[in-house]
Amino acid sequence: MVTGVVLRGMTPADLPAVHLLEQVMFPDDAWSPQMLAEELAGQPGTRHYVVAEEPGGEIVGYAGLAAAGGQADVQTIGVRADRRGAGIGAALLTALIDEASRRNAEAVFLEVRADNPPARRLYERFGFFEVGVRKRYYQPADVDAVVMCRRLERRPVGFTRGNE
């Protein structure tokens, strides 16, 4: 729980509220209701989506992860503008990284708009580093995407020479 906000798994009932936030936060390239529903339908197989909910039930943020084949990708993460800076984005990102670890991913990747320094700083604080740029990725704004990666710690399973 961060500043009175609880993180919980996203459900189909959350999709209208999430879509409204999506349109406000990402007006140029918001996902459609169908895209959101298709992503959510991938749970728990290859997807993991969470929402940040205030005590009154209002959703103020959300995030999603795709994970398969030892790799995870942050699909989306967003916090309503008036709730930014309260640790909600960090809590959502932590939830995604934790889920990637549970799924035995070796690394987590994401794309972030090149013109979004606050988001880049958040990811860097969490150990993400730049691995490339996708030119003009965000349309119609012609904004580059910075591709970032964070390696996840792999713990040995079973016996090792040290504990035989």
Image (cartoon, grey):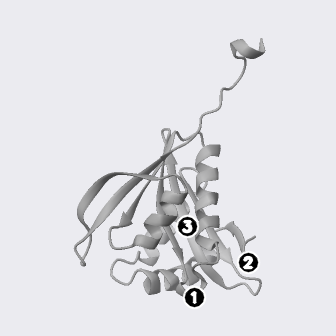
Q: Vertically, is 53 above or below 64?
A: below
Give whichever of discs 1 and 3 has the lower sequence position.
3
Query: Would you name the residue on which mark 3 appears?
Result: 63
How many C-alpha atoms fall within 10 Å of the one at disc 3: few (<14), some, or many (≥20)?
Answer: many
Query: Would you name the residue on which mark 2 appears?
Result: 3
Q: Is residue 43 left or right of residue 148?
A: right
Rendered-image quadrant of the C terminus: top right
Q: For the residue marked with disc 1, what is the amino acid? A: Asp
Rendered-image quadrant of the N terminus: bottom right
How many C-alpha atoms fall within 10 Å of the one at disc 2: few (<14), some, or many (≥20)?
Answer: few
Residue 153 in percent (x, y) is at: 59, 38
Residue drawn at x 60%, y 83% is 83
Specify the quadrant of the image occupied by residue 56: bottom right
Query: Would you name the residue on which mark 1 appears?
Result: 82
Q: For the residue marked with disc 2, what is the amino acid? A: Thr
Is label 2 in a helix, a strand or a loop? loop
